[in-house]
Image: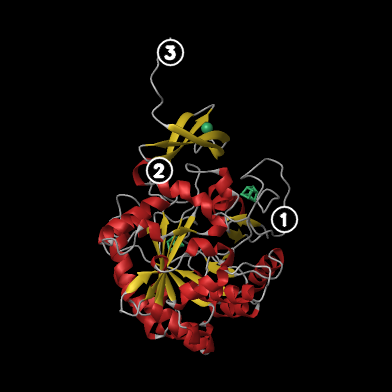
Amino acid sequence: MGSNENRNYTFYEFTNSLCPVCLDTVPAKIIIRDKKVYLLKYCKTHGEQLELLEEDVEYHLKKKLYDKPGTSMKIHTKVEKGCPFDCGTCPQHDQHACIGLIEVTNKCNLRCPLCYADAGDGEFLALDHIEKMMDFLQDSEGNQAEILQISGGEPTLHPDIISILKMAKAKKFKYVMLNTNGIRIAEDEAFVKELQQFVGGFEVYLQFDGFKSATYQKLRGENVFSKKQKAIDSLGKHKIPTTLVSSISAGINDDEIGEIFSYGLKQPYVRGINFQPVAFFGRTDQTAEQNRVTLSGILKRMEQQTSGMLRLDDFIPLPCNVERVAITYMYRSSKGGFVPITRDARIQEYLHLINNTFVYTIEDALKNAGRSLLDLNTSCDCFKFLNDFRKIIPLDFFKKSKMQKIEYVDQNTFRISVSSFLDAYNFDMKSMQKECVHVITKDLRKIPFSAYNTIHRKGSSL
Ligand code: SF4
Ligand code: SF4
Ligand SMILES: [Zn+2]
């Protein structure tokens, strides 16, 4: 009969998950063990499953303090089979699209073993169809869509890529990102020159996974490091703001996080780095047990590998999706080096000034503070906020021309974010429903990125 031994974990909360084998919805406990957070689930057919959710329990527990209500958007489907099968977006979804993503092709000049899109030989979407997708995104966001990411496959291979970007700008997306592996950028300087016309609400989102040949072999199928370096040089030469996007996999390149950070900081037009734990969907044969790294795991490694120049505490869970995005800004201090903004400004107190969006810029926060000052109903936090931020951005910043502002931000601030996605292993329904990166499919649906890659891609890809 039963023993009196304790369980080896603490129960924290309950959620729904998926069984990665049969993709059935299964009940899951979120539990804490050895200062880490796990999902413990049970599938009637495939038994008990344990999955790592976060590597730092304290970070996990503090996330909730940053949560804000989601922003509503147009609903396109009904609740029928339950989440994540009703995308989208269905009435259960709790967050609008901070980022709308359009895959303009599934053709690619690389064959990355971890490709989410299973890209390779493929076709190009016609310009008029892409226009319909952009209009659909704008419409579902009440014509105030914020960020459009042009993705693929490799979007720079699309013969109409410049027209696509022109169209995106004409449709008044606040921010347009070009999501690229950088091969064409390294090889075709005339193309980089053409991209210059989009600067101001435009950036290149450049895949960059580290320095080791083995990293590129395992993640990208060939060593493309020298191409990355060439691409960064060319983008710098033509003054094009760039974010490095690093996919991190445990045991492959999780020892390169610190070095990626110091490298990025030194490149004049690299404005930031986005680290992404590799998710287990698409072409990958990695298994969750061996290669899983989590958002807080990346933050911990960053602290270790930058000798504390960045600390786990410098990161705040982004209010639009606290579970899956962490962010910090660094600014150039009067003494020269870069310092995380959290050391000088009490970000936690100013959450109401931060937009429900992914690319939260210092400039946006200052503008919001200015707006709130005119609203007599708000508390005087905004004055404190301006005082705090005066150390960071000189007040004459707003007198600068648009190009001077861009130049100033490029040279003096640096954004570091970590965004993680959900796959069939670490699927947590409550976190899923707050996801703010939405894919616009060619059959005009708007599907949260993780649900798209876990469930829906097969039925709707090019
Ligand atoms: S992921 Fe969002 S849109 Fe999709 S089924 Fe779940 S709640 Fe609905
Ligand atoms: S991950 Fe990106 S670069 Fe690699 S094959 Fe897929 S689309 Fe191409
Ligand atoms: Zn199962």
Residue under label 3, please give it: 2
- In the rendered structure, find residue 300 and report the number of the disc placed on it: none
What amino acid does circle 1 point to? Answer: Ile
- Categorize mark 1 by other alpha carbons within 10 Å: few (<14), some (14-19), many (20+): some
Q: Is residue 343 left or right of residue 462?
A: left
**Disc with the residue nearer the chain's start (2 vs 3):** 3
**Circle 1 — which element?**
loop
Q: How far apart are marks 2 and 3 (CA)?
A: 33 Å
1 vs 2, front mark? 1
**Disc with the residue nearer the chain's start (1 vs 2):** 1
Residue under label 2, please give it: 288
Rendered position, 122 above or below 371: above
Q: In which quarter of the image is the C terminus?
A: bottom right
- In the rendered structure, find residue 75 and report the number of the disc placed on it: 1
What amino acid does circle 2 point to? Answer: Ala
| Front in this rendered view, residue 288 or 115 | 288
**Circle 2 — which element?**
helix
User: Residue at the location (34% across, 43% down)?
Assistant: 290
Q: Distance between the residues labelled 1 and 3?
A: 50 Å
Q: Are marks 1 and 2 in contact (CB under 8 Å)?
A: no
Q: Quadrant of residue 99?
A: bottom right
User: Residue at the location (32% across, 60% down)?
Assistant: 257
Q: In which quarter of the image is the N terminus?
A: top left
What amino acid does circle 3 point to? Answer: Gly
